[in-house]
Amino acid sequence: MAEAILQVRNLKKYFKTNSGMLHAVDDISFDVREGKTLGIVGESGCGKSTAGRTILRLLEHTSGQVIFDGVDITKLSGNKLRKVRKDMQIIFQDPFSSLDPKKTISQTISEPIRVNRILTDKKQVEERVLELMKTVGLAERLINSYPHELDGGRRQRIGIARALAVLPKLIVCDEPVSALDVSIQAQILNLLKELQNKMNLTYIFITHDLSVVNHFSDDIAVMYLGSIVEKAPAEELFNNPLHPYTRALLSAIPVPDLRHKRERISLKGEVVSPINLPDECRFANRCFECEARCRRGIPPLLEVSPDHFVACVHHTPPEAAGRAAGEALA
Ligand SMILES: Nc1ncnc2c1ncn2[C@@H]1O[C@H](COP(=O)(O)OP(=O)(O)OP(=O)(O)O)[C@@H](O)[C@H]1O
Ligand SMILES: [Mg+2]
């Protein structure tokens, strides 16, 4: 089994707002194995992007640890932080707004190469840009094109080439295909998979759409209101979802094979505010299995079978009590 290149432990990111402290990421723990993909899934606003950005230190964390290659990077500064930033890149949802409209493909891809002093010779930089364009499937003739001259798929390919330019080890892919046409989504997913195999890249793949991570992820973490409510190897999560929220998400995925069709579970009620959260299961007000005991505290994320973690009182075996995810993984 591949070693964990990234270990996230009890990570919290709160935002101070006028109405109180907003718990965007509230005590999440997981491992990401080298060369593998961890999918993070959940509805809009559940904290996926904040988690990704806090891990990359694009946002400062409130508390917890982010151990990358054996080093807690939340404590780094200066040159050491710069080196880690190079090793961990991000690909954004909307390639159009993440690319500078005034820069050509060549300027966009060469920038990180020059800034990080990976190459300094002009000719070598140009050769490297062309090589990267080839790697991500962009035709050489587009080298002096601007983002507005290209379609969404090609723009996302530029975003990927730019991330690859610094030879990263880990890439946070934040909804990288959500803004693309369905036909192009598959092409970009295939490209990411191909690059992962070729370069032994590790991915954190963020999406609100479970069907997208289905074939893409090795492990999946399901987030609800800042917390992870279920986490398991992808196949196990799809075959044996335990948390009512995961079951509801899965029931919404259309399946062509009628034998595996699940009854659609539609969730009622609103997501509660992430500010001043009640001391109870955060899903309780929308849960179709809610009982009085669900209101008596926040259920911890516990390992209920090997590598399968769930935070739900209905799935808390007595022998697992007290074994929260952070401890079990440590
Ligand atoms: N800079 C900020 N200041 C205050 N609140 C923030 C800030 N950034 C995010 N939030 C809040 O943190 C919570 C998590 O937001 P986040 O963008 O991480 O969610 P998400 O799961 O990525 O959603 P989406 O699927 O829409 O991208 C939301 O309630 C959001 O309003
Ligand atoms: Mg987001």
Image (cartoon, helix red, strand yellow):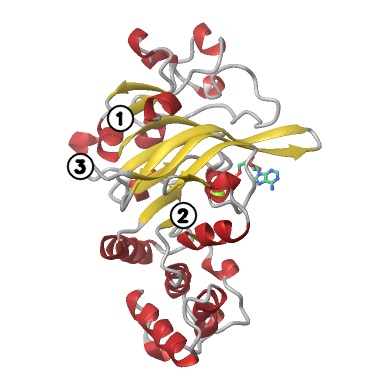
Task: Return the disc, 2 or 1, that comes first in the chain's sequence.
Answer: 2
Give how far apart the Cα atoms at labels 1 and 3 are: 28 Å
Total labels: the figure holds 3
Image quarter in which the C terminus is found: top left
Give how far apart the Cα atoms at labels 2 and 3 are: 32 Å
* Location of residue 41 in the rendering, given as x and y in whole percent from the top left corner: 44, 42
User: Disc 2 on helix, strand or loop?
Assistant: strand
* Location of residue 2 in the rendering, given as x and y in whole percent from the top left corner: 27, 45
Name the disc covering residue 172, or none.
Answer: 2
Residue annotated with mark 3? 257
Residue occupying image coordinates x 43% and y 75%: 154
Q: Amino acid at mark 3?
A: Asp
Instruction: Check contact, mark 1 vs mark 3: CB within 8 A.
Output: no
Name the disc covering residue 307, or none.
Answer: 1
Residue occupying image coordinates x 53% and y 63%: 94
Relative vertical location of residue 188 with respect to residue 216 in this rendering, above or below: below
Residue occupying image coordinates x 48% and y 80%: 150
Q: Amino acid at mark 1?
A: Asp
